[in-house]
Amino acid sequence: MQEDFLQYIWKYALFASDRLVTTRGERVEIMSNGQFNSDSGPDFLFARIKIDRTIWAGHIEIHVKASDWYRHHHDSDPAYDPVILHVVYEPDCEVRRSNGDLLPTVVLPFKPAYLDNYHRMLKTLSAIPCTTSWMSLSSMIVEGWLISMGVERMESKALRIQQRLRQNHGGWEQTSLQLLMRTFGFGVNQETFDRLGKNIPVKAIRNIGDNLFRLEALLYGQANLIPEPAEDPYSRALSSEFFFLCNKYNISRLDKPGWKFMRMRPANFPTVRLAQLAGLISLMPLNPSIMTVESLPQDIPVSTYWQKHYDFGKEWRDQSPTIGKDTLNLLKINHLLPVLACYASAIGQPQSNVWWMEQLERLPPENNRITRLWTGYGYQVPNAFYSQAFLHLYQNYCSSRRCLSCRIGQAIIGSG
C-alpha cells in the first residue's frame, strides 16, 4: 500500500461515504474533502466534516498505518493540531495531537479492485504502465488527456523560453541563438550544445554573417574541438581564425566540454552537427521579428572539408549525409515554432498559441523510440502535436509511474 494511493482515493472521493465511521464507531459525513497540499504540513487543507452532530473545520492527514502519525513525529508538531480527521488503511493504534487530545481516525473504505488495478500498472515491466488497458476506456477520456498533454508541453516550452529571455535581459536574438544550439544537441550532446550557445555572443554571429568558414572557426574553436597541434591545412586555418576571433570578441573555449562520441553513428557526431549548424546559421535569421515558418532552409550547405570528413582527419567511406527531412522537422518543432509563438505573444499578438498548435498539426509526427512505444500499444500518432503530447506524457508521467496524476491511469484504476 502506498500513501499517495490513499491520497488519490480521498481527493477524488472514490470511497464508500456511507461506510465512513471512526474507529470508535462515530458516523462521519464529508462536507468538503479539502484542498490537496503539495507542500509540507497536513495532506488536505481547509476540509469540513461532520462527526455525529458536530461540524468540524480543519485539515486532513492520511497515512497507511495510524502509527505513522508517531513515526513522522506529528504528535509533537503544533502544525498538525488543526487536523480534524486521520484517514488510514491500517488502524494499528490510537493517535493524539500535541496537546494530548484524541484525534478521530477512520479506515478508508474503497473497492479492492482499485488497488489491484493500480498495482497492476505499477508492477508491469512495460515502459507504458497502462499498456493496452486504455483500449477499454472512452475515446473522449483518452483524446482529452492527450490534448491536455500537448498543450502542457507547449506551455512548458514557453516557460523555458521566458526564463531564458530573462537571463538574456530581454535579448530575443541571443535567446533564439541559444535555443537553436540546444536543439541541435538532439539529446545526447544537448547540454554541451546549450553551454556552447551561452558562450557565443550573438554580436559575433551577426558580424560574421554568411561567412561559412568564420562561423566554423567560431563554433569549433569555442567547442574546444580544433586539434592541438593542428595536423592539416584546414585545422591550422581554423585555429588561426579562431585566435583572431578570440581577440576581437573577447571569447574563449569551453572548459571541459565533455563531448560524447561513443556508441554514436558518425552522422550524429558533434563535429558533423556543428558543420551543419554553421551552414544553417549562415542562411537563417536569428531575430524572431524577421523569422517566418519558411525561414528554415531546406538545403543547408556544408563546407567542402565536412563533406569529406566526419571528424578531424577522419574521412567518410561513402558520401556524407545531409540534414534530412526528419531533422528539419525537429528543428521546426523544437525551435522555430516555439520561438515565433512566444515572440508573437510577447508583442501582443492574439491567438499565438492557437497558431502554434495549428502549425504542429500540419507537421508529420516525430519518429523516435518513445513514439514507437505508443504505436506499439495501438495508439495513433497523426501529427507533430500528438507526438509532442506522447513525449510529454511519457517523460512526465509514465516513466515515473505517476499514474495517479494521469487521467488515463485514473480512469483505469476507477474501472474496477
Image: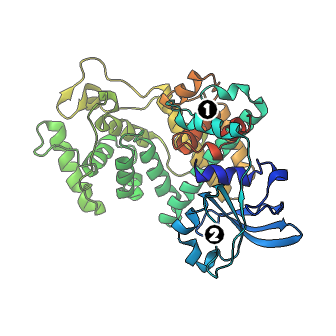
Q: Label 2 belongs to which residue?
A: 95
Q: Residue at x 64, y 47 (%)?
A: 405
Helix or strand or loop: what does disc 1 sit on? loop
The image quarter in which residue 84 lies: bottom right
The three-letter code of the residue at mark 2 reads Val
The image quarter in which residue 104 lies: bottom right
Q: Residue at x 51, y 35 (%)?
A: 330
Left or right? Give the position of 156 relative to 107: left
Q: Are marks 1 and 2 in contact (CB under 8 Å)?
A: no
Most extreme residue toward the right is 53
Residue 43 image offset from top left, x and y in percent = 65, 63
Q: Nearer the viewer, residue 122 or 304?
A: 122
Left or right? Give the position of 349 relative to 262: right
Chain-order first, disc 1 or disc 2: 2
- Whether residue 298 appears in this view of the structure is no
Q: Nearer the viewer, residue 67 or 25?
A: 25
- Whether residue 102 appears in this view of the structure is yes
Q: Which mark is residue 130?
A: 1
Protein image colouring: rainbow
Q: Is residue 354 above or below residue 62?
A: above
